[in-house]
Image (spheres, rainbow, N blue to C red):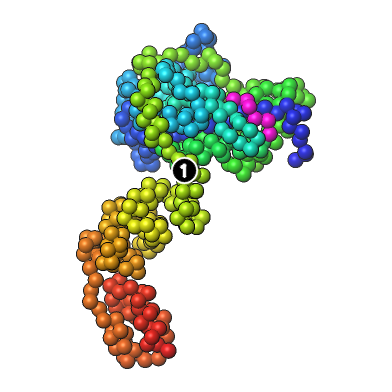
Amino acid sequence: MENIDYKEIGLTAGLEIHQQLDTHKLFCECPSILRNDSPKLKVQRKLNPVVGETGEVDIAALHEKAKDKTFAYEVFDTNCLVELDEEPPHEINQEALKVAIQIGILLNCEIFPVTQVMRKTVVDGSNTSGFQRTMLLAHDGYVDTSFGKVAIDYLFLEEDSARPSSTKEGEDEESSENNKSYKLDRLGIPLVEIATGPHMHTPEQIKEAALKIGEILRACKVKRGIGTIRQDVNISIKGSQRVEIKGFQDPKMMITTVNEEIKRQKECLKENSCKKEVRRAEANGKSTFLRPMPGSARMYPETDLKLIKISREILNEAKTTLPKLLSENKSYLEKFGLNDSMIKEILDENKLEDFKFLLNTTKNAQIISKVLISYQKELASKEKKTLEQINKILTLDRLETILQALESGKISENDIKMIMQKIYEGQKVEEAMKKEQIDLESEIKSLIKEKPGLSSNAYMGLVMAKFKGKVNGKEVMEVLGKLVK
């Protein structure tokens, strides 16, 4: 790639970030879970665009309507009539509203005291109603970067779209343009949209702003994993038209994608063929055409819902329960002498609050981290289970009881892994912590007499096999160290 003078070419760019919230759906009580089993039933619909507030039909909606598609929707037992557009939306999900407000506060935004739910025309099949419900919640915020402040123009709270049934979990719908079948599992999941506006002028600034906004989102109650965040970038250079590139997720490819789009727009300027359009980011950094750029004609008010009032009480609650950013949590954990690897695991596994809770039982941060992370991972690997399955049995109250016994001297640190194993196998905590009176030295002397000349490791294996978790490996090795020369 040639050296680019971004100031000379007049690079202007903005980000649009869509992030799912980890709550039930926005306008009904259905759970926000994705399904990979067979649907309960299927329905078919055709969708038609309607005029927006401007009295015109949106150009992108007309483009989709021209394809004259019939859409099939897969319905599950975790869906209701709201997703089928056979029942009016329920009152807004208060938890999702609170999380969205917290995101707005962390983005230094002004929260609107009152907001109107709007309908945004969408007739590509991803909404059974032909529109997406969205509301403008906050405005005029910013994030700090090494290039200075990047303005956050708007924060929206809206419902996610349906998911194409032929795509893999987490794959964006744009990657399956001709798909006519959708799952209703994703439709209605609360989603925040963050729009920076055209305030960035180098690829490095775009990338840093994206990562900063991502850190703020991850601090809040949002869903994690592939497909839960979708990021777009709007790019234009001097003399060209604004182009929206969807799927701008991979930090490693962000700078390349921006530079490739600059190169493409330069060619368009030479050929006098620049258009306002939506494109999809490809793995090589280039992009491909999706559809024309939507306009302002797609919005009109939602008549089935009242105005949403953001009371002082809601704002105060959001502020008093405001989560800390990843960088703040990392600094907090560093004070306890934990290494970077353990800190990362605690934060990645969302175990920070559990860590804080167990500090009330013991101030030994190292053993808390082992109990929450290391020992559970070892057990999951040994039993060929997921961490989630292990967590369901080794609950926080059971771990607290184990650490209380450690603090009172009833058990030693060396006993903990063995106790956790017994609890996983079905023993009650009190039973698992009982120690059998085993004279290790006599047992090992007897074994050496019976099978002389073996190595310490061989004797170790025989002892552990005989007592099957009833003895501690470290104590066995200490005795062997005295008896086997």
| 254 shown above or below 429 | above
- x then y, percent, for residue 93: 35, 28
Does 480 lie within the magenta span?
no
Q: Could you tell whether 73 is left or right of 172 in the image?
A: left
Instruction: Give the structural element (helix, strand or loop) at label 1.
Output: loop
Quick one: quadrant of the C terminus? bottom left
Residue for point 73% across, 32% down: 6
Magenta stretch: dominant SS?
Answer: loop
Looking at the picture, tell me which residue is in the foreground, 485 or 238. 485
The quadrant holding residue 375 is: bottom left
Q: Could you tell whether 250 is left or right of 258 in the image?
A: left
Q: Which residues are magenta?
A: 197-202
Residue for point 51% across, 23% down: 139
Question: Label 1 is placed on what type of residue?
Answer: Gly
Q: Can residue 413 be spotted in the picture?
A: yes
Looking at the picture, tell me which residue is in the foreground, 279 or 303. 303
Quick one: quadrant of the N terminus? top right
